[in-house]
Image: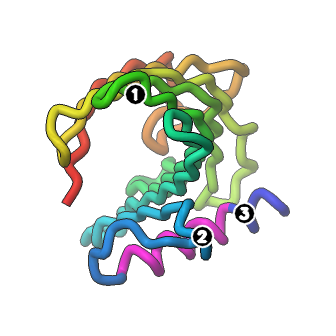
Amino acid sequence: MVRYFVTAFFTAVSFLNAQNPPDVLRTIVGNNQANNTDFAYPISMFGEQHSSFSVNYPLSKTFEAELQGFYNTYIGPFSTDRFRVNSRLNWKMAKRLTVFSGLESEFEIDKMGRKTRKPRVGFISGVMYDLRENISLESKMNLQLNDSPVGVYGEPLIRMPQVYTVGSKIKF
């Protein structure tokens, strides 16, 4: 029950904030330290929905705690909705180089009334390099720690492998 409440709360906050005009970093604490960023794609004509949020809290000049959440709905009769949350510690090693690690959990929300599977828990680590002030490149590893049957992209029949990703971020 708590899992569904937490999922619904963060999803609702993300959906509501993502509809606001794009003042990307909004202060959520009175002392101007913690920042919230969120984003949501429009709901597709097939009913798919994707949204995310991030809360950053600086601990010192070089360390930062970060909480990220992602909510995805997928089309298809056998697919499940997903809520993925990770908490990580970022260490700014140089002006443009950041190393991070933490834990990630992925929960499924079944649309067909079937029993949901136990959440997938993984260890994440990686490196991020700022190419420019508004463009960064990130390489990340996700090592699954438990034996969860949660599958890939909402499909419960395809087992989730260990994941290595390379991506980029553009800040507007």
Q: Quadrant of the N terminus?
A: bottom right
Residue type, label 2: Asn
Q: Which of the two labelled residues, at mark 3 and mark 1, occupies the earlier sequence position?
A: 3
Considering every residue shown, the one lying at the far right of the view is: 1
Kindly report which numbered mark, 1 or 2, lies closer to the viewer in this rendering: 2
* Picture coordinates of residue 16, whole percent (x, y): 47, 80
Residue underneath mark 3: 6
Q: Residue at left 55%, top 61%?
A: 33
Q: Nearer the viewer, residue 155 or 21?
A: 21
Label at residue 31 = 2
Q: Is residue 128 above or below residue 39?
A: above
Kindly report which numbered mark, 3 or 1, lies closer to the viewer in this rendering: 1
* Picture coordinates of residue 145, whole percent (x, y): 69, 19
Residue 125 within the segment the image draws in magenta: no
Q: Is residue 83 above or below residue 43?
A: above
Kindly report which numbered mark, 3 or 2, lies closer to the viewer in this rendering: 2
Q: CA distance from mark 3 to mark 1?
A: 29 Å
Q: Residue at left 53%, top 49%?
A: 68
Q: For numbered disc 2, what is the local secondary structure?
A: loop
Label at residue 98 = 1
Q: For numbered disc 1, what is the local secondary structure?
A: strand
